[in-house]
Amino acid sequence: MALDEKSMVDGFFGEFGGRYVPEPLIPVMDELKDAFYKYKDDPDFKKELAYYNKEYIGRANPLYFAEKLSQKYAAKIYLKREDLNHTGAHKINNTIGQALLAKRMGKNRIIAETGAGQHGVATATACALMDMECIIYMGEIDTKRQALNVFRMELLGATVIPVKTGGRTLKDAVDEALKDLIENYNDTFYMLGSAVGPDPYPTIVREFQSIIGKEAREQILEKEGRLPDYLVACVGGGSNAIGLFHPFVNDKEVEIIGVEPGGKGNKPGENAASLNFGNKGIIHGFKCFLLEDDNGEISSTYSIAAGLDYPGVGPEHSYLKDSGRAKYALAYDEDALAAFHELSETEGIIPALESSHAIAYGLKLASELNEDKIIIINLSGRGDKDVQQIAELEK
Ligand SMILES: *Cc1c(COP(=O)(O)O)cnc(C)c1O
């Protein structure tokens, strides 16, 4: 059985993924899975999703030929411009898709967890548009670190609940959201923000993010008359990357490279590079490569880019690494910062710090290639949200 068919049945990508959840959540996940496979190819659902992709998000966004960078580094560099989407990143592709699915399921109360606040804002945006109640769980510490995103969510009509248990960060917010779901699943839909979590979430998120790779494929065939040699995307949980990669996975001539946050260095706690430094383990209901400390506890993580700061990684990336189909490289904080400046100065595009990791690796790769090679780099988001952080860092 092909991988996609098998994961559709049992939720596993090789040995990764699955559904390691408390008993009461099993029927909830089954209901979600049934609804997803019922609607994903339904003509009315597809038509409605296509309408919002075009008219609200602003798709298709360009596959931009970065001419000046290409001259500088020889290889042809194309940027997939997810930064031009409404709200400025790829996360909206997924929240609009899941909101439409929740509507079909008759669930009008949306809950989500958020760490840096980006997924919370994308969720609150979709809920405002679709007239849905929106509750965002966020660790109390994160609400203070990301106060501006809390304000954005509230402007959009969401209720932000600061979670005061445990370490008061993302992990505790996930626990609270799951508790809410178990109590309220009759009218409540849990909107997950990356290609992680128990089956069927990694597949749902991949489905809605795959619009990135589908467009890029059509666009590069139109511009170059052939597929690219390389795809490059940053990997936090892995949703923007799997969205670009998935439509090319069966094209063996296309090399696939995910870029993980190397942070300050290779020691435990200094990075969030689960595929480079992790062991196989279970987190948040699924099996993947996972950063652990010497006692086998989930390790503390760090990245200059808040959106990449997660100790686990999507199960499909874990499989792509294990099977050798994709490679996972590192970009350190300083590489990302340099790329942030270089793209701003060279092309007049200020990238998100997350995306800057992909740019950093993509440029390094381009410098080693000749001019007939083609690289597509996913520009997952714009950098407006990061400008203040950089200003303070470089003061
Ligand atoms: C959240 C975020 C990421 C990381 O999430 P993935 O699920 O790995 O894509 C990357 N880039 C931007 C701009 C983000 O907001």
Image (tube, rainbow, N blue to C red):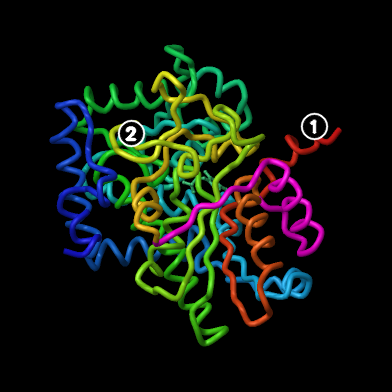
Q: Is residue 167 above or below residue 57?
A: above
For marks 2 and 1, the one nearer the N-term is 2
The question of residue 338 being in magenta is answered with yes
In terms of image quadrants, where is residue 209?
bottom left
Residue 16, percent across and down?
29, 45
Q: Is residue 83 above or below residue 193?
A: below
Q: Which mark is residue 243?
A: none
Q: Amino acid at mark 2?
A: Gly
Residue on which the image places disc 1? 392
Q: In this image, 324 relative to 109: left or right?
A: right
Q: Residue at x 68, y 48 (%)?
A: 383
Q: Which residues are magenta?
A: 325-351
Q: Residue at x 63, y 50 (%)?
A: 357
Residue 332, percent across and down?
66, 43
Which element is circle 1 on?
A: helix
Q: Nearer the viewer, mark 2 or mark 1?
A: 2
Q: In this image, 88 relative to 98: left or right?
A: right
Quarter holding the N terminus? bottom left
Q: Is residue 68 above or below residue 158?
A: below
Q: Residue at x 25, y 51 (%)?
A: 14
Residue found at the very far bottom of the displayed protein: 225
Quarter holding the C terminus? top right
Compute the Cα span from label 2 to label 1.
Answer: 37 Å
Residue on which the image places disc 2? 281
Residue 259, percent across and down?
55, 51
Residue 296, percent across and down?
39, 23
Q: In this image, 390 relative to 357: left or right?
A: right
Q: Is label 1's Cβ within 8 Å of ligand 1?
A: no
